[in-house]
């Protein structure tokens, strides 16, 4: 992919989309922001117009209200499952490529083994099931594609676990945070760099991307409070103590060796990246 190419970015006004479009401009590409309310990924004619105007499309658009999705199944499926299929079909017909952003929620593993791209999927929620269906629909479209599964993302341009913990810690007298969900908090700025690598290399296939290392939600929350100088007492608990409409995967450990073999950047450690972000954001 040459500099000066036009990159369509669905969900371009979202947390990842904004970091990606900024990086694309810096790298000499022309980002074409595609987002609500002007454009809708579930609208076939909108998708066809985007593909026509783009050299490659990065699909960052997603229905991410995980708990609400359990009762809003139709809309969630339209965005997460049907839209990638429509995008893939339009891209195949136009000879264009699609980069699809997916999630650790396609898994539901409770073990402690890092999961590679060949690990069996087992979504526990409507959100996870529809994101997996979106991967499958894109793969079946005959388009050239790359799928990047990401996890526990945070950034400056949207609500996330980091901002929620910081907000709650300032409001409440004490906090309980689950210690049986394990993964790697990953900045959207780093995800954007990985996407740029995939774009430049014209690579296709399925990849996992996350920060290095693993931690529980509780361990992450402890670092947030420490770095921000918040003295609110915090204690660990199990996911069973906080039942939610949608179940979360307990094991989100990614094996990222496949994407490491093609990246020209080194993935940061989760704690180093988090501290850097907190110093900048707060």
Image (cartoon, rainbow, N blue to C red):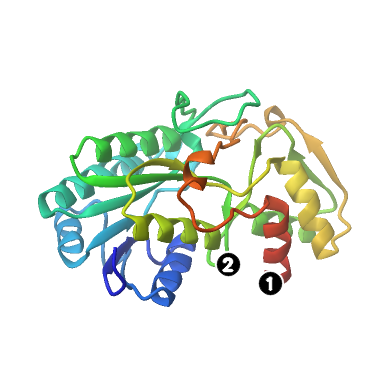
Residue 65 against residue 201 in the figure, above or below: above
Q: Which mark is residue 156?
A: 2
Residue at disc 1, secondary structure: helix
Residue at disc 2, secondary structure: loop
Question: Residue at image x 49%, y 62%?
Answer: 15
Judged by depth in the image, the label closer to the viewer, 2 or 1, is: 1
Q: Which mark is residue 232?
A: none
Residue 4 appears in which quarter of the rendering? bottom left
From the viewer's perspective, tell me whether residue 226 is left or right of residue 157.
right
| Of 112 and 230, the residue lying toward us | 112
Which numbered disc flags the more N-terminal residue, 2 or 1?
2
Question: Residue at image x 75%, y 50%?
Answer: 221
Mark 2: few/some/many CA within 10 Å (<14, 14-19, 20+): some
State the image coordinates of residue 233 (x, y, percent, origin top left): 88, 49
Residue 250 against residue 34 in the figure, above or below: above
Marks 2 and 1, how far apart at CA: 9 Å
State the image coordinates of residue 60 (x, y, percent, origin top left): 38, 55
From the viewer's perspective, tell me whether residue 62 is left or right of residue 241.
left
Question: Residue at image x 56%, y 25%?
Answer: 109
State the image coordinates of residue 176 (x, y, percent, origin top left): 78, 42
- Which quadrant is home to the C terminus? bottom right
Query: In the rendered structure, are the residues bearing label 2 and label 1 in contact, judged by CB atoms less than 8 Å apart?
Result: yes
- Which quadrant is home to the N terminus? bottom left
Question: Residue at image x 14%, y 53%?
Answer: 95
State the image coordinates of residue 5 (x, y, percent, origin top left): 26, 70
| Of 238 and 281, the residue lying toward us | 281
Q: Which mark is residue 280?
A: 1
Mark 1: few/some/many CA within 10 Å (<14, 14-19, 20+): few
Residue 208 against residue 107 in the figure, above or below: below
């Amino acid at each position: 992919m040459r500099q000066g190419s036009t990159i369509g970015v669905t969900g371009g006004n979202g947390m990842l989309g904004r970091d990606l479009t900024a990086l694309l401009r810096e790298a000499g590409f022309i980002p074409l922001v595609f987002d609500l309310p002007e454009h809708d990924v579930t609208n076939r004619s909108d998708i066809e117009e985007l593909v026509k105007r783009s050299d490659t499309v990065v699909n960052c658009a997603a229905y991410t209200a995980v708990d609400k999705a359990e009762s809003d199944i139709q809309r969630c499926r339209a965005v997460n499952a049907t839209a990638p299929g429509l995008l893939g079909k339009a891209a195949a017909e136009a000879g264009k490529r699609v980069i699809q952003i997916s999630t650790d929620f396609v898994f539901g593993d409770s073990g402690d083994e890092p999961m590679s791209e060949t690990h069996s999927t087992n979504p526990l929620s409507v959100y996870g099931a529809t994101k997996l269906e979106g991967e499958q629909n894109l793969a079946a479209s005959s388009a050239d594609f790359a799928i990047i599964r990401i996890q526990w993302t945070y950034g400056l341009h949207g609500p996330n676990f980091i901002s929620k913990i910081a907000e709650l810690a300032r409001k409440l007298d004490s906090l309980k945070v689950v210690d049986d969900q394990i993964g790697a908090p990953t900045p959207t700025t780093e995800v954007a760099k990985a996407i740029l690598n995939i774009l430049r290399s014209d690579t296709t296939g399925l990849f996992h991307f996350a920060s290095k290392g693993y931690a529980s939600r509780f361990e992450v929350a402890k670092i947030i409070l420490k770095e921000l100088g918040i003295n609110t007492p915090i204690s660990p608990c199990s996911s069973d103590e906080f039942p939610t409409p949608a179940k979360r995967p307990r094991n989100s450990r990614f094996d990222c060796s496949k994407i490491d073999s093609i990246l020209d950047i080194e993935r940061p450690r989760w704690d180093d990246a988090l501290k850097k972000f907190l110093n900048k954001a707060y």
